[in-house]
Image: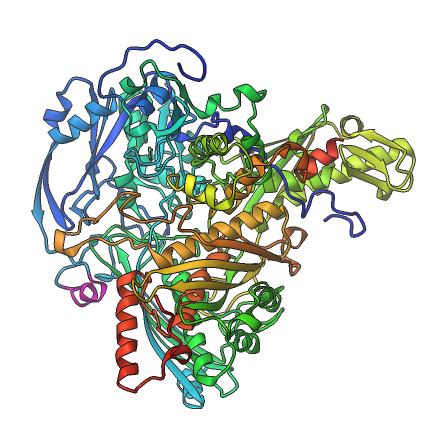
Amino acid sequence: MSDEKREAWQIGKSHRKVDAMERMRGVTRYTDDIKLPGMLHGKIKRSPHPHARIVSIDVSKAMAMDGVFAVVTGADMPTPYGIIPWTPDETALCVEKALYVGDGVAAVAAIDEDTAIDALGAIEIEYEVLQPLFDPEESLAQSRDNPINPYARTGNLSKKVLLEFGDVEAALAKADLVVEGEYFFEGTTHAAIEPHCAVAHVEPNGLLTVWSATQVSHYLHRELAKVLEMPANRIRVIQPPLGGAFGGKSEPFDLEFCVAKLAQITGRPVKILYTREEVFYSHRGRHPMKMKYRTGFTADGKITGVDANTVLDGGAYSSFGLVTTYYSGQLLCAPYEFGAYRFLSRRAYTNKPACGPKRGHGSVQPRFSLEVQLDKAAVQLGLDPIELRRRNDMGAGAKTVNEFQIGSNGFLECLAKVEAASDWKTRRGSLPYGRGLGVAGSTYISGTNYPIYPNDMPQAAVQVCLDRSGRARVFSGANDIGQGSNTMLAVIVSEELGIPLDDIRVLSADTDLCPVDLGAYSSRITLMVGNACLQAAGKLRKKVCEAVAKRWEVSPKRVVLAQGMAIDGDDPERNVPSAQAFVWAEEDHGLLGEVGSYNTPKDRHGDYRGGTIGASPAYSFTAHVAEVDVDEETGVVDVKTIWVAHDCGRALSRRIVEGQMEGSAYMGFAEAIMEQHIVDPGHNGVHPGPSLLDYRIPTFVDTPELHSLIVEAHEAQGPYGAKEAGEGPLHPSIPAIANAIYDAVGVRMDTLPFSPPKVLAALEARRAAEAAGELAPHKGAARRTA
Amino acid sequence: MVNGEVVQLAVQPHRTLLEMLRYQLDLIGSKQGCDKGDCGACTVQIDGVPRLSCITLALHAEGREITTVEGLGAAHGGCHPLQDAFDRWDAAQCGFCTPGILMSAEALLRKVGGEVTRTQVREALAGNLCRCTGYTKIIDAVVDASRPQAAETDDTSATEEAAQ
Ligand code: FES
Ligand code: FES
């Protein structure tokens, strides 16, 4: 740990990222920019049926084509795998059945893309078409008669979790107000601008290298070994710079297995790049959830109990679904004290692209429900919604109703910041009909206490080496997916060793060169990898300071490493360049290299089955205020501004943190207003618009002004006090917008997205109720004139 | 002409400009996000005007001047003020949209010829999708780069301070 009295010279500043300029100059090599001698191009043949048994596959015609080097089918890689080791229910390519339109059935490697596409057309597949199931509840009802996934253990029920903490019925019975609501969160997808891509190459001695646009190289490494039935030490996985992920690249996909197998068969490098359409079908995005909530309140707005009943539409495979099902209930228990809590969550298989983790995994949907419930209560109790949230704040050091240990907690400050920045107190009451302000809060994890596969090894490890020219090399298995984790590591090494960022080279996400890291998911990297890096760099700092102190004949405490120098803290005139300090240290210690590792505390979760899932070393807190303008003629909701206050513990690099907050708020806004990832049962389960035009994502013009307000509640578990910033700030966007719409025009939007037809229908209903005298005109009827 | 150099090349008539740039000239800076004109990642300039190279035939470029992100800094010692501003503002997260956005933004700055407004930036870049940033820092960076002497007025990064 750094000395208390030493002033930070890097932490908390803004930095140019270590790898941004080369991206800007167009010289960064993303996966699709890799070109190897003799490289073949692969393509995957996909099922046109949402549910079908594969009767036969004839690849002979394709194989006979000029320029075709190999064809593989499910039979070539039949071992089932799954990102969650308890639910191995998918295979690299379909073996027995195809479970959704777009499921991969065969793959070819050919001299070029055009030939590969032609070869797909020559593969003959006979299917026995089965009855598809698109509705999760219908699917659960037909578990016995029409089971979807051949590897599933309990019919079409992919996972069920029922947990109760305290006596919920009693808590609701004694409440002064019980708000009941039904919500539907439409699924959405990640839509990273870089499509998935993988390249494989096999050495003559059998060593396999796979380059992949993945955010979890370690898990990919493990699954490749399993499915290809070869030892992990014969496989190297490299993640090149990544063009966005958001959870959409956090498990293996068919293309990675296929390039590997095809490269093994042909002896030549093979590349597969998904088309944009394939990206949409591969999906693994946010689960549609149907949620029923009952929330009890005292007359002064305190939550007495929460009862949640959720059905998750999982799609064809488990993906992370076991975890998602837990998260849909487990991550809801902060920042508010719940008295009592019960949730029942059931995940169903359906014949659709599989759902998985998207930024804010599992908790964005229930957070929407809860925060709208709170808003409804505030209206009914005549309380200011920010004040109602304050009254329920659990504070720092609290234990949640489901027994998670909270550390630092800046939620009240988040509320205060958005309240002040939006001028809430003066403006909220005076905005005209059509304009509204809404608030919402949330919490999120900084990594999970337990890894995906049980083991007692560190969750993160980093190696740092110094050389006599005054440079440092950082080896880290962590995946920089654009969120800036490589820069975060450089900032820590710079802070500890006093050298500028330019003199630090970060080598990451290469399983041959770097220590194992579990990857970029659950917002774990800053806290976990940051701690590991701080430990390694701290050990080196000690060695360097001691070496300098010895030469100067002073106490090592006096030696400060900063500004590219070693400086005598009591006599700053005395200093030497970093390179000289490193030379002295190398003279004393030999080659300068240290490792650091981090493991999570194991005493911060519940002592019940499932009590570890959702438990984190530290929790971030967020509050948003959204301002909307609702056009009552068209139903268009124009989100003007979102103020985002986020407690990240400590912002290690300010602009990067702001960027995460803005990107998160944007993504939540997008889901609130326009996005829906659906397939059409009326058209046999086909995606109605698998393109970036039809699947509408916000442009520069659509996106509101986003104001990021950093809150820093120092967290004892985090490096320099830091917690996560990459996912938490997504959550409140959606309910804050829903609540702002209510403030603007008096209608509740309980179903996503808040598209014009839905808003118009709600306005119609409200007008009818007003005309019937059931409701008073919203905001005193002062309708604006067109 | 590609980035100021005369290029002579045989191309199949159905090849797109993006394919020609990436596969035949190894100019990998222009990105393919959708290959159908929806995302803007492949934006290049043809005779100074931003165009989607994934839906432009390579033959269409014959006799014209093509500028890609690799050529953007040529007249500025390798680093265009926009690139510098994007770097200072952390306006590129994953950076996959960035080459296309830079090419659209450069055309805007040239057209306006002075300080641009946030609204002008939003409108000029509406054809370029970014999924990471929420656009805010990109707008900040473009506005910043449009100011005279953007380089001097920057709030310099800690690293640069350290180097002095
Ligand atoms: S790749 Fe050209 S617009 Fe998307
Ligand atoms: S920075 Fe990733 S898409 Fe724009």
The residue nearer to you, when weighing A703 against B70, is A703
Viewed as shown, does residue A269 lie left or right of A716? left
Q: Is residue B121 left or right of residue A408?
A: left
Q: Main secondary structure of the magenta part?
A: helix
Q: Quadrant of the C terminus of chain A?
A: bottom left
The number of discs equals 0
Q: Position of residue B1 (x, y in %)?
A: 39, 14
Colour scheme employed for the rendering of this structure: rainbow
Q: Is-magenta flag for residue A140?
A: yes
Q: Quadrant of ligand 1?
A: top left
Residue A681 part of the magenta segment: no
Q: Look at the image and tell me whether residue A454 can be seen.
A: no
Decide which of A445, A702 is in the foreground and name it.
Answer: A702
| A652 up-or-down from A107: above or below | below
Specify the segment rendered in magenta.
Answer: A135-144
Q: Residue at (34%, 76%) from the top-left corner?
A: A181
Query: Is residue A610 shown above or below B141?
Result: below
Q: Position of residue A150 (x, y in %)?
A: 20, 52
Q: For residue A259, what is the image quadrant?
A: top left
Q: What residue occupies the far front of the structure in this picture?
A: A785
- Residue in view at x 37 percent, y 30 percent: B42
Q: Nearer the viewer, residue A8 or A80?
A: A8
| Whole-percent x, y for residue A657 in the image | 57, 49
In the picture, residue A295 is in which quadrant?
Answer: bottom left
Q: Position of residue B35 (x, y in %)?
A: 29, 33
The answer to whether A14 is drawn above or below residue B44 in the figure is below
Q: Is residue A230 left or right of residue A646?
A: left
Residue A56 can be seen, yes or no: yes
